[in-house]
Amino acid sequence: MEKLYELSEGGLHPEVNVPQLLSEIGCSREEARSVHQYLESKGLISWKCKVMHVRITPRGIDEVERIMAQTYAAKEFRVLKTIHETKHKAPNGWVNLDDLIRELPDIPRRELFMILKDLEERKGLIGSIDQAVWMVPAGIEELEQAEQYPNHSTEHFPAQIINNYTVNVQGDNQGNIAQAGSGNTQSIVNHQPISEILPKLAELIEAVRRADFEDKDEVVRDLEKAQQLAQSEDPKSKWALIQSKLSSAKTGMEIVGFGYNSLPYWPAIWQYFFG
């Protein structure tokens, strides 16, 4: 859907050439058939137009823009959290941009700079000077509210995002949030040792390999990446990335209408990583 949205220039030219679309996403016509049927059943696309063209519908445009906005907001919240958690590494709580880039390797530099600009100029949650950023009182208050009321939206972030990236904060001389240190990692609701969930994750991956649905190889790759991150020396520091890969796998199964809740340990694994 995102590629269709991109090729249609945000719906400005809603009809897109099918061979071009399939080439862009690396998918054959046979592989795309079930996806097309699912998306059309939801009213997100239409094939009732010129031969070999697919049309993104107004509802499809709205859905893609909603998902893109939510994804961007999740990245903003994660960057804000990372600034807070990293500020102890720089004098006076100022986080060097190079340090921040190293902390967020999966966010492209250009996008990260755009997020920082929005957090400062549009939302007023951080400050910046030269090659450093820092938390301002409004940003500290935003994280305090997220910590105290994780099931409620704050002024700038919806509750769903806050629940996915729970904040671990305590008091200091800048309000109630402590300066981040080695103990201030991402809060994890489930305190079961991760070693106990790893065998279940391995069995889940094998079950997906045996399952019969379109694009399962992509789902397997996402789950294997989550497994790799969970087996790392410090999995807590990679919690957001693990959640991202699990969410991507879930979305992949949803698109083709596969009933993932019937997979072994899927509900338990989801509960463990998302709480």
Image (cartoon, helix red, strand yellow):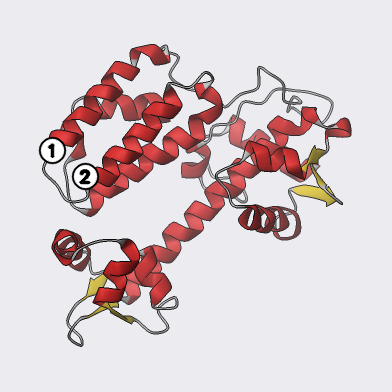
At 65% from the left edge and 53% from the top edge, which residue is drawn?
109
Quadrant assignment for the C terminus: top left
User: Which is nearer the eye, 45 or 148?
Assistant: 45
Looking at the image, can residue 142 be seen?
no
Determine crowd level at label 2: few under 14, some 14-19, many 20+ residues with C-alpha closer than 10 A: some
Q: Is residue 127 left or right of residue 201?
A: right
Query: Going by the image, does 100 lie left or right of 134?
Result: left
Q: Where does the image place residue 12, in percent across and percent down from the top left? A: 42, 83
The mark found on residue 216 in the picture is: 2
Query: Residue 92, located in which quarter of the rendered image?
Result: top right
Label 2–label 1 contact, CB within 8 A: yes
Query: Disc 1 residue type?
Result: Ala
The N terminus: image quadrant: bottom left
Q: Is residue 106 above or below residue 4?
A: above
Secondary-structure class at tag 2: helix
- In which quadrant of the rendered view does residue 148 lie? top right
Q: Secondary structure at mark 1?
A: loop
Q: Position of residue 202 (x, y in %)?
A: 27, 23
Name the N-terminal-most of marks 2 and 1.
1
Q: Residues within 10 Å of mark 1 (few under 14, many from 20)?
A: few
Residue 131 shows in this picture = yes
Front residue of 46/132: it is: 132
Placement of 133 over or under 204, stated as above or below? below
Q: Residue at x 39, y 39 (%)?
A: 245
Say which residue label 1 marks: 211
Q: In the image, is residue 40 above or below residue 147?
A: below
Say left or right for 101 vs 266: right
Tell me where residue 138 appears, x and y as whole percent.
Answer: 75, 45
